[in-house]
Amino acid sequence: MSLWEYANPVKFLRLSRKLRPWVTLGAVLGCSIGIVWGFFFTPEERVQGASVKIIYLHVPSALVAINAWFLMFVASLIWLIRRHHVSALAAKAAAPIGAVMTLIGLITGALWGQQTWGSWWEWDPRLTSFLILFVFYIGYIALWDAIEDPDLAADLTAILCLVGSVFAVLSRYASLFFNQGLHQDASMSVDKAENVSDVFWQPLVLSMAGFILLALALTLLRTETEIFKRRTAALIRREVH
Amino acid sequence: MKSIILRDIRLALRAGGGLGQALGFFVIFVVLVPFGIGDDQALNARLAPGLLWIGALLSALLTLERIFYADWQDGSLEVIMTSSLPLEAYVLGKMIVHWAMVMMPLVALAPVLAVLLNLEAGAYGMMLLSLFLGAPALSAIGVFAAGLTVSIQRGGLLLSLLVLPLYIPTLMFGATSVRRAAMGFEMSSSLMILAAISLASLAVLPFVTAASLRAIMR
């Protein structure tokens, strides 16, 4: 029993259908409990007041935004090396989710920045690299849409994803080079003595887990849809010829 | 490979290859700046490094669409694929031709336009050097994106959507080194990174581009 068995679309569908209700349930629970707890049952922060509550949307969406790209990177590699169709379709399915999460991260960040820094936008390394990530998502989705032959589209978008990842990482370090930035550093590292205080931390972890499960549920659902779409197209082709 | 390069250079010379248009665009771009920003000489001098870099990059972008288009349309790409020449060498040849026939004239034009933008006298050498070091990266990345989009009808807009984000690191390090030179700071580190991006792009992207061309011709 190896992981590669699920490269078979039928087996993948069976597994995905079994998992999806539970993942969705976890997503609903995590998001709703985390956000409601965070919004209504945590104290206001001493300096930032109520605006600190944006953290329960901002941090989880940013987390998903990066990891959706990472998922696409791994799925593209698997497609190029082992040519499993499910993998290419999963990469295609994850892209719009990642793009929307990036946008949520940017917008909530702008709202929060307006409250605490006094400006909607700063050319800070983190903000800049997120904007660049968003542009990469748009280009990737546009390339998928522009090519009709599904295998060719999968090939070219996978190549774009790999090359794009290198340049995205490069841009991340380049933007560190050109501006020192306002954004705080990671506040939840495991190895640091001083982190976000516990009252904020517990609902945040819940809502992060909720967002990850939500992205996973949506990716599974969209991958299933892509598989069905491809089957329908094959059936139509058979009818016509 | 040599004959491919010579053929493309000859084609570029005879048909123009978009070179004249790219140079014209670069001039117009710089001429537009004072109309948009005003004729404040001090402000223009501050903006000059970034504007020259962005202008060179956008002018190069204009010429990318036709790099593989003719070869793909008239079937020479198929002939080249079945010949003994590795596809990677063909792609590298395309990069070299783009560098020599588009980027180098743009770099040569840049000092003239820098006068219009009132660039600091001390920054001229650095501007030429940074454009010279960054140009191979711009050519290599551009040829890569042209290879991705050659099979797409009216792919020009998509091409710019794909290639401009990839240009960001090159632009950032290139313009930073000119800006630092204009302010009299040390800039060897950003120049070295710029050269590294060019070398790495030239080393890796021919293989990647050849892979995408093979997928398209399959």
Image: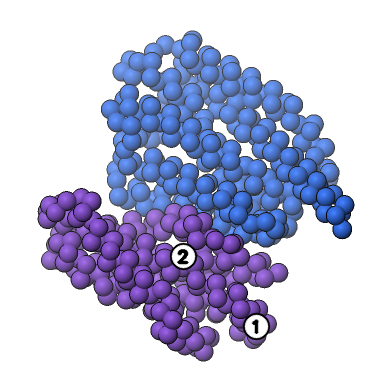
Q: Which mark is residue B177?
A: none
**Residue B133 in view here:** no
The residue nearer to you, when weighing B203 against A186, is B203
Instruction: Say which of marks 2 and 1 sits in front.
Output: 1
Badge 1 is on which residue?
B79
Q: Are marks 2 and 1 in contact (CB under 8 Å)?
A: no
Question: What tint does the image give chain A?
Answer: blue
Q: Quadrant of residue A183?
A: top left
Badge 2 is on which residue?
B141
Task: Locate residue A98, reporting x and y percent.
Answer: 56, 40
Instruction: Label 1, secondary structure: give it.
Output: helix
Q: Amino acid at mark 2?
A: Ile
Chain of the residue displaying label 1: B
Instruction: Label 2, secondary structure: give it.
Output: helix
For marks 2 and 1, give the CA distance. Answer: 24 Å
Quadrant showing the C terminus of chain A? bottom right
Q: Quadrant of residue A48?
A: top left
The residue nearer to you, when weighing A194 against B91, is B91
Residue A69, placed above or below residue A18: below
Q: Residue at x 55, y 79 (%)?
A: B90
